[in-house]
Image (cartoon, grey):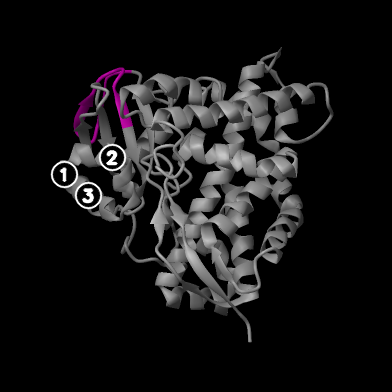
């Protein structure tokens, strides 16, 4: 299969084969013109240094011109702008406007708020572990990795518990719509269907919370002023969707991918059992190793040069994060999973002005979940086939059947 066909095929990213391709592209063609089914093509960017430059220069590499979702066919291109709320949610708003919106949303994710909220986060995670079956046979993704971030972000947003499972189903459609397990119609129909349901839900809640003195992010946005004017309703709703999706996906993928890596590298698990304080560093390696985000798109706002290639204004560029996080120019022994790795300059949460707002929360969730796993269980065994999501956008494990072994 040709390189471009592989990069445009979501099923390719349900295998580990893409790491070998990325290694070769970093060496041979680190900024590669990629033909795409929609006929426009895009630049594939593979090196850590080039991606970091793009992330740190949002005025030149825009999130707002065409959004950040990889657009690989005409049908997806037609729905991408509406689905992602391009120009209306914080992920697809460029500086300096980006900073105003981020400021409104950031309060619950700042260090003091996270520290104050840690007992509640620990309580929610413990409750999920308490509900696991005594025989210990579970799908670590569906029964733990999915439910932990869902509970935490829904609790932060003040969403009723009876809605959580429905919202999670919509999230799988919106983010994983290229995977046959989540499809309802075509990939584009699935993605837009999931986003529309989440948007409608977020919109209704935002309307209810106008004028209410609550401190959750939706209420803060619903009552916020941007440059002296009320934050438009559509922007409140789109940002509500963004918080839900980011909350669901990143932690799920990093936690489950990190646990799988520990099971494949038992000496690393032994280090964490020996000293759980190592978990703070280990979480960074979980994120580097598991690559919760596969790719994000940018659009050039002016002619420029990147990696020796001339980029024209209006051309799209796709950043491949698993490639950056295995870049041998940055990481010593990049294919060694090392929970003591320091420094760990991964781009799993991005960089620059768009650095993931919920990154610190995700790291707290993973650390607390791992504390519970180590404390409650003497061991973990894989009991069935491990499956990855078929997606070139947000990647990760779909199923990880395991047996949790009780302490004697």
Looking at the picture, does residue 337 appear above or below residue 289?
below
Q: CA distance from mark 1 to mark 3?
A: 11 Å
**Toward which corner of the image does residue 297 lie, by quadrant?**
top left
Q: Nearer the viewer, residue 29 or 18?
A: 18
Residue at image point 20% right, 29% down: 35
Could you say which disc has been placed on residue 9 in the image? Answer: 2
Q: CA distance from mark 2 to mark 1?
A: 10 Å
Pointer 2 with pointer 1, Cβ within 8 A: yes
Q: Position of residue 254 (x, y in %)?
A: 49, 54
Which span is picked out in magenta? 302-317
Q: Position of residue 80 (x, y in %)?
A: 43, 24
Residue 383 in magenta stretch: no
Q: Nearer the viewer, residue 78 or 42?
A: 78
Residue pointed to by mark 1 = 1
How packed is label 1: few (under 14 Cα within 10 Å), some, or many (20 or more)?
A: few
Q: Is residue 215 left or right of residue 101?
A: right
Residue pointed to by mark 3 = 21
């Amino acid at each position: 299969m040709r390189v471009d066909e592989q990069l445009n095929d979501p099923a390719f990213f349900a295998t580990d084969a893409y790491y070998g391709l990325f290694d070769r592209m970093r060496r041979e063609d680190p900024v590669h013109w990629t033909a795409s089914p929609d006929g426009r093509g895009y630049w594939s960017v593979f090196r850590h240094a080039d991606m970091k430059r793009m992330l740190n220069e949002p005025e030149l590499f825009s999130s707002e011109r065409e959004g950040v979702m990889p657009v690989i066919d005409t049908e997806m291109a037609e729905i991408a702008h509406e689905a992602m709320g391009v120009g209306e949610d914080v992920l697809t708003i460029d500086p300096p406007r980006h900073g105003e919106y981020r400021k409104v949303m950031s309060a619950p994710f700042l260090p003091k708020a996270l520290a104050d909220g840690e007992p509640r986060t620990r309580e929610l995670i413990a409750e999920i572990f308490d509900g696991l079956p005594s025989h210990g046979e579970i799908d670590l993704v569906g029964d733990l990795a999915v439910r932990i971030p869902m509970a935490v972000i829904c609790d932060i947003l003040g969403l009723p518990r009876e809605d959580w499972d429905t919202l999670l189903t919509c999230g799988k459609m919106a983010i994983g719509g290229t995977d046959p397990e989540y499809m309802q119609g075509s990939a584009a129909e699935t993605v837009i269907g999931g986003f529309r349901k989440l948007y409608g839900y977020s919109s209704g809640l935002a309307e209810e919370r106008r004028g209410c003195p609550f401190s959750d992010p939706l209420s803060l946005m619903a009552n916020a002023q941007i440059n002296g004017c009320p934050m438009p309703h559509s922007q409140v709703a789109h940002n509500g969707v963004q918080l839900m999706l980011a909350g669901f996906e990143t932690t799920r993928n990093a936690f489950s991918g990190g646990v799988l890596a520990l099971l494949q590298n038992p000496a690393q698990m032994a280090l964490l059992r020996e000293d759980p304080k190592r978990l703070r560093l280990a979480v960074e390696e979980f994120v580097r190793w598991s690559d919760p985000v596969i790719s994000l798109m940018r659009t050039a706002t002016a002619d420029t040069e990147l990696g020796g290639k001339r980029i024209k204004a209006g051309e799209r560029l796709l950043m491949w994060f698993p490639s950056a996080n295995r870049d041998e120019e940055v990481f010593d022994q990049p294919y060694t999973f090392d929970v003591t790795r320091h420094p760990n300059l991964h781009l799993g949460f991005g960089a620059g002005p768009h650095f993931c707002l919920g990154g610190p929360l995700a790291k707290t969730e993973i650390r607390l979940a791992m504390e519970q796993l180590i404390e409650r269980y003497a061991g973990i065994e894989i009991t069935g086939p491990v499956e990855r999501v078929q997606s070139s956008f947000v990647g990760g494990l779909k199923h990880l059947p395991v047996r949790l072994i009780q302490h004697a």
